[in-house]
Amino acid sequence: MGIQAFFRQVIAAIGEADRDGLVSDKGSDVLGGLSGRATVGLLQRLVGLVEDRNSLCYLEIGVFQGLSLLSVAIEHPEFVCFGIDNFSILDPKGENLGIVQDRTRRLKAVNAHLINRDYEAALEHLSEHIGDRKVAVFFIDGAHDYRSQLMALLLIRPYLAERAVVIVDDANYFDVRQSTRDFLVSHPEFKMVFEAYSPGHPANLDDATRETHEAGWLNGVNVLVLDHSNVLPVMLPRVEPLARDLYVNEWLAHRHRYAELAPQALDLAAAALNGGDMATATARLAEAYAKDKPTFDSRLSDRNLHCEGLPERRFTEWK
Ligand SMILES: C[S@@+](CC[C@H](N)C(=O)[O-])C[C@H]1O[C@@H](n2cnc3c(N)ncnc32)[C@H](O)[C@@H]1O
């Protein structure tokens, strides 16, 4: 099949997922999670398009309780699927690993393999996990900060199959769109073929609107393909002028003595500015401070560079 026919298949698969959601309700009595049904349905359909089923695989970052990984795996039981998660967030009781293992057993998804590791370490050493397979479908749904999103795109590059499709979840976040755009403009061999957004984060939507988007693309997606022959037009996600200023803020915050306390400090600021519960916000800030008081106290008030021990100068070892 020529590349243009492949692109048409990908676009048709997106249209079908948009209209019909999941490919089937296999596993729906066992699975639940944090991805839209159109998003999961697209992953299932894209894996269905893969021609070389022995040397390629499905890979995702962000397994959570297994919805996306296991939905793909049970729809394509002969196809090898990998999911990376270190269960570092959205797991207050530390139960998600057990839930994934239990659901994998109940669904007999022997082709689903969990890589229980930080995404960056996993991607830097990916062949330890996936062998000499290439990745045909790559789903990014881990930490949604700018750097994690961009690193996921950069680190996967050498492992992608010629006809890879990359699905970036949670594209409603402006940090996510910014990293996708930065990647696309610096890697013009990739093109975006589809974007979808909801009017807000699911947590901020009314029930009816949220349910509509749970059936769809939930918190937004960007879909990218590799287009070496430069057939497709350039299409970039919208970025917000505000973001540039906030990345400058990031520099100011990161060098500050209390950098890690920024979320709690902002909650306290919000309580002070909006007449909220300052006592609770102060207690949370103090609690977070107490967790690593010696580190905070060892720092300067500002311009912490963490450069101790760096060589004054160093040349390459090449001779
Ligand atoms: C939104 S959830 C994924 C939802 C899942 N795809 C589904 O269908 O339900 C995000 C996941 O990313 C994982 N995550 C966050 N930071 C990570 C990191 N640095 N390395 C690996 N996984 C990470 C979290 O533990 C969490 O389970």
Image (tube, grey):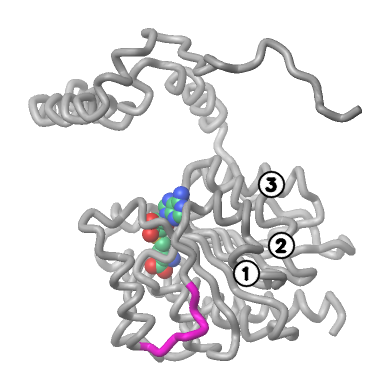
268 to the left or right of 72: left
Q: How many marks?
A: 3
Q: Which mark is residue 130?
A: 1
Per the rendered image, the range of residues in magenta is: 107-113
- Reading the image, the residue beneath label 2 is 159
Is residue 112 in the magenta section? yes
Q: CA–CA distance between discs 2 and 1?
A: 10 Å
Badge 2 crowding class, 10 Å Cα cut-off, few under 14, some 14 to 19, many 20 or more, is: some
Q: Amino acid at mark 2?
A: Tyr
Q: Amino acid at mark 3?
A: Phe
Q: Amino acid at mark 1?
A: Ile
175 or 124, nearer to the observer = 124
- Give the dominant element type of the magenta stretch: helix, strand or loop: loop
Label 3: which secondary element = helix
Residue 132: x, y in percent?
72, 70
Which of disc 3 and disc 2 is earlier in sequence? 2
Which of disc 1 and disc 2 is earlier in sequence? 1
Label 2 within 8 A of ligand 1 by Cβ = no
35 to the left or right of 307: left
Residue appearing at x 28%, y 68% in the figure: 208
Q: Which mark is residue 183?
A: 3
